[in-house]
Amino acid sequence: MRVQAIWGILIEGQSFVGKSTVVSELKRQFGALGRGVRHGHCFLVVDELNKQIHDRAFSGLPELRDDAAAEWDGFEHFNSYKSANLILDSYMAEHDSELQNGSGVHARIVVQDRHWLSQFSYNRLFTPERDLLSDRWIADCSPRFALQVYLTCTRTTRVERAATVIAQPRTPLHGFLARNIAIIERLDEICLTQVTEDAEWMIINTDHMSPSAIASRIVSEFNSRTSFEAQSGTEI
């Protein structure tokens, strides 16, 4: 059975859609409102075991070539460890007192950059036979947030953003995706299919909006869903 929604915002989306920039802007805007922010990236609970499993996923991923047919075996390791990381993290989040009891005017707002949805798309594309992060697990165990946002964009926008990181990618996976936008588009399609008809999700196309405008829209929606403005007396 799922627990109450986490007092905060989940930002999901595939690479080169602008997630990290929007998250930074959300932190700035909430800070300007005098609200504390608990920022998470990839997992919610900062824990040594959580971090070790997450790092193991990336350390075991081979140097990725662009002949995609040769890459599927490499994702068996990555998807297994990342899914285990998210299952453990979701369980730990259920027992994190701040995450489960953090609503209200004086509570820190959780701003989470990625969680289960991005990994779900990798599982479905690269290792569908494994059924990692199953539909039943998503329905019963995946963390829910007061607001969940999926960012998407067109191919043209993604290609332009990817071009700025191809020379110096953060990880081999990041570089592989920057060179293979078609794979990102397939991952994006999987996520959109998962969330488009789900009222818990807000979908934003980032093509023609600045990070500041996107963040402002998200803050406004968060306020609407949580009645934050009414509680705090603060205007945006």
Image: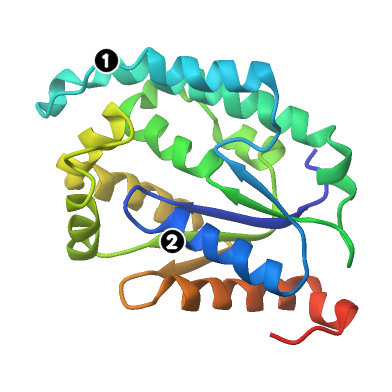
**Residue at (21, 52) in percent of width and height:** 164
Q: Give x and y (percent) for residue 46.
A: 69, 30
Residue that carries the numbered disc 2 in the rendered image:
151
Instruction: Give the colour scheme of this rendering.
Output: rainbow
Quadrant of the rendered image containing residue 230: bottom right
Residue that carries the numbered disc 1 in the rendered image:
62
Q: Secondary structure at mark 1?
A: loop
Q: Secondary structure at mark 2?
A: strand
Left of 35 or right of it: where is 41?
Answer: left
- Please determine whether, in this image, residue 119 is positioned above or below residue 85: below
Quadrant showing the C terminus: bottom right
Left of 143 or right of it: where is 208?
Answer: left
**Residue at (43, 23) in percent of width and height:** 79
Q: CA distance from mark 1 to mark 2?
A: 28 Å
Q: Give x and y (percent) for residue 23.
A: 54, 58
Label at residue 147: none
Query: Looking at the image, which is closer to me, 95 or 232?
Result: 232
Query: Looking at the image, which is closer to me, 167 or 235?
Result: 167
Quadrant showing the N terminus: top right
> Residue most toward the left?
67
What amino acid type should be assigned to the residue bearing mark 1? Pro
Q: Give x and y (percent) for residue 209.
A: 38, 77
**Residue at (21, 43) in percent of width and height:** 178
